[in-house]
Image (spheres, rainbow, N blue to C red):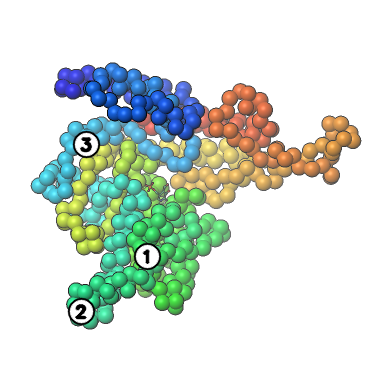
Amino acid sequence: MTSHQFNNAATEAIQDITNYYDNISERPVLPSVEPGYLAKLLPQSPPTEAESWDKIRADMESKIMPGMTHWQSPDFMAFFPASSSYPGMMGELWSAALTVPAFNWLCSPAVTELETIVMDWVAQMLALPECFLSKGKGGGVIQGSASEAIVTCMVAARERYVTRTLEKEGIVLTEEQKEDRSAEIRSKLVALATKHTHSSTHKGANIAGTRFRSIDTSLSNAFALQGHELRSTIEKLKAQGLEPYFLTVSLGTTNTCAVDDFASIAEVKRDYPDIWIHVDAAYAGVALVLPEYQHYCKHFSTFDSFDTNMHKWLLTNFDASCLFVQNRCDLTDALSITPAYLRNNFSDQVWFVIRTWGVEGLKAHIKHHLKLSDLFVDLVKGRSDLFGIITPPAFALCVMTVNPTLKQRAPKPSTTEGEPDAENGVPYQDSHIAVIPQQPDSEVLEQANANTKKVYEIVDQSKKVFLTSSLVGDAYA
Ligand code: PLP
């Protein structure tokens, strides 16, 4: 492809992309294809001869789009937001255009330095303590995902624990003895998290080859881990000869957006300084751009690392998981990478996004979503006959249930036709639960039970709310 051809093809691609976003709400969110649909549409072997761009472009609409789940649709209401924005795409375009394997400073001074600078900007925007900025021993590095950030910190924590234990033992060992003793120490290590912490901590422990234990939390504390629960778990494990070395605390758990009790956990950390505490703020962390949330940062200087995904809720395309550590040597020592490790092409995206919106624009974006969430919560509360709220709404997340008291009675079999029997009737098998088909059409809705129809009414109302929040169409830029 020549630069002239690229110019034409890229112009068309950008037209296709803007058309896609302008009309995305007309597409069904979920595809209606069967597993294996794509293999039937594509040749079994790669093309021998070059194909024209026109042909490739046409296949995007005819073959790929039918198999897409449209995460950016305003009708997409599952899982979590996965940000996309035009400035984010521009950053991605430049990153692809430059394509620099920047594994040390000289391989691309601009890329290496941009990541450090932009991560310092992010730390300041989120009001993280100064110890996470690069001017001291700390700093930020962009990771692909929050899970990757956890496993990276866990390996660093494991090696730091081993090194500190060896130092405390103070015995002079040969290299081989040191390796054997290190393996013994590693075999006792336990990573901790609560039952509500994202599963990546458990998976990380499997990858790091250490044990994992989960700590119970209670609904009365909105599932937030308390210092005394942590302390008793540590004491119990130590009594068994095991060594807790890593804990994930959450600023916004996946299920309910619970925030662990950082103050009491920080007190425990003072007694057990060798346990690495990682703050997983994958989704909710970007809300720290708002001053009203920044009180959560008060105890972070006691913790070792913090991570949030800009690609979830802050207008940045995949992958921009922002990991900050207090001591970058913990990472470099454990992972044997060069000190100029702060490198990643995705810093282009973060840079473009922050500059295009400015801190005030990013604050307005989060505020807008919080306001939409309040509207949604009001809609839900206004229908307490249908819904219950389980934990207090937090960070634009509303954890709700179809009201369990919503049981209706069926007519007593045979006797008086059509008259429900409040005393003896049996519950309708299908009516106290709202069954939500994935692709509702008029026929499905026709057959839906009464509660399902009511749920759709609410969804329809809330759609009007969500429609106004389409990210790419946001008017803050
Ligand atoms: N932590 C929390 C609190 C999350 O909600 C999620 C994902 O939803 C993760 C971690 C995992 O994030 P990632 O997919 O970036 O690994």
Point out residue 153 in the picture as x, y percentages from the top left corner: 31, 58
Reading the image, the residue beneath label 2 is: 173
The crowding category of the residue bearing disc 2, from other C-alpha atoms within 10 Å (few below 14, some 14 to 19, many at least 20), is few
The amino acid sitting under disc 2 is Leu
Q: Is residue 30 left or right of residue 363?
A: right
Q: Which mark is residue 95?
A: 3
Reading the image, the residue beneath label 1 is: 210
Point out residue 324 in the picture as x, y percentages from the top left corner: 28, 54
Do the CB atoms of the residues marked 2 and 1 lie less than 8 Å apart?
A: no
For the question of whether residue 382 can be seen, the reply is yes
Residue at disc 1, CB closer than 8 Å to ligand 1: no
Point out residue 466 in the picture as x, y percentages from the top left corner: 48, 32
Residue located at (40% from left, 29% from top):
39
C-alpha separation, residue under disc 3 versus residue under disc 1: 37 Å
Q: Dot 3: what SS?
A: helix
Name the residue furthest left: 106
Q: Dot 2: what SS?
A: loop
